[in-house]
Image: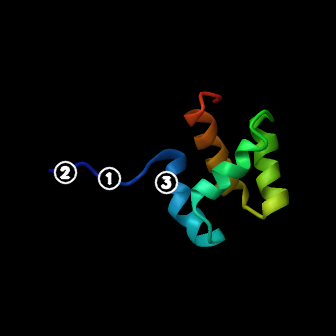
Amino acid sequence: MQADARATGPASYFPSIEKAYGKPVAHWFALLESVAARPHMEQVAFLKASHGLGHGHANALVAYQRARAGRA
């Protein structure tokens, strides 16, 4: 039996983020690099206020990016 290949955790939001906002997640990660020094919730607020993302989607992107960069 094969393992389920679906993403888990924050990455499970990526398909709906791309569909809802019409941009690949790489676009959002590039934007987050410009505010990488800010705390987690300030980065979430940046995506929400400046780019219209919903809280859950913004939080998922920030959590994934920070974990990937070792800034959890």
Amino acid type indicated by mark 2: Gln
Instruction: Measure the C-alpha gap from mark 1 to mark 3.
Output: 11 Å
**In the drawing, does residue 30 fall left or right of residue 64?**
right
Residue 27 location in percent, x, y? 64, 57
Q: Residue furthest left?
A: 1
Q: Residue furthest right?
A: 49
Mark found first going from the N terminus, 3 or 2: 2
Amino acid type indicated by mark 3: Ser
Q: Would you identify the image quadrant in which residue 53 lies? A: bottom right
Residue 60 location in percent, x, y? 62, 49
Secondary structure beneath dot 1 equals: loop
Mark found first going from the N terminus, 1 or 3: 1
Nearer to me, 46 or 9? 46
User: Badges 1 and 3: C-beta atoms under 8 Å apart?
Assistant: no
Mark 3 closeness class: few <14, some 14–19, many ≥20 residues within 10 Å:
few
Residue named by callout 1: 5
Amino acid type indicated by mark 1: Ala
Secondary structure beneath dot 3 equals: helix
Residue named by callout 3: 12
Identify the residue shown where x is 77% and y is 44%: 34
